[in-house]
Image (tube, helix red, strand yellow):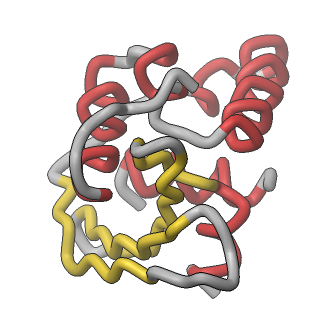
Amino acid sequence: MTRFVSALAIALTVSGAGCAMPGPERVVEQAVSAARDGDRDAFLACFTPRSRALLETWWRATDAHNPPLGALGAGDVRIVAIRVVPSRDFEPERAVVEIAEGADATRLVAHRMGGMWRLDLLDSQRADR
C-alpha cells in the first residue's frame, strides 16, 4: 500500500485552521502536499476539528511507541472523481472525493464549513466501506 493512502487508512482505522481554497479537490491537494513535506501542522489544517483530535492522538501514541508508523508521506496521488452532495437535511455540505495512489484507492469525505473544505476521517471511514 502506498504511503498517502496507507496513512489515511491507518488514520481511518483509528477512527483547523482550514485549507481556505475553492473546491474539495484543493483540500486533498493541500493534504497531499503537506504529507509529502512531512508537515504535520499543514496536514492537520486540512481536517475537521474532530479529525484533528484523532490525528493528534494517533501521533502522540506513534511518536512514543513506533515513530515510523506515524510518518507522513505521499506518492503519486490522483483525484479520480468528485461528487458534491448538497443537502438541506444536514450541515455542512459534503463532497466525496475518490483518490488513487498507485493501485490503492479510497474515498474521502470533505465538509464545507464556513466556506472552507476540510477532510473528515470519521465520515471518510463510513464512505470507504
Q: Does the rendering let one see residue 106?
A: no
Picture coordinates of residue 52, whole percent (x, y): 68, 32
Q: Does the rendering let one see residue 66?
A: yes
Q: Is residue 100 left or right of residue 55?
A: left
Taking depth in this image into account, of 85 and 89 the one nearest to the observer is: 89
Quarter of the C terminus within the rendering: bottom right
Q: Is residue 87 left or right of residue 55?
A: left
Picture coordinates of residue 20, whole percent (x, y): 33, 32
Residue 122 occupies quadrant: bottom right
Residue 53 occupies quadrant: top right
x 40%, y 15%: residue: 39
Q: Is 91 above or below relative to 28?
A: below
Picture coordinates of residue 30, whole percent (x, y): 28, 35
Q: Is residue 110 left or right of residue 90?
A: left
Residue 84 occupies quadrant: bottom left
x 55%, y 40%: residue: 47
Quarter of the N terminus within the rendering: bottom left
x 50%, y 42%: residue: 114
Taking depth in this image into account, of 103 and 80 the one nearest to the observer is: 80
Picture coordinates of residue 49, whole percent (x, y): 70, 35
Q: Is 49 above or below relative to 45?
A: below
x 65%, y 66%: residue: 91
Numbered marks: total: 0
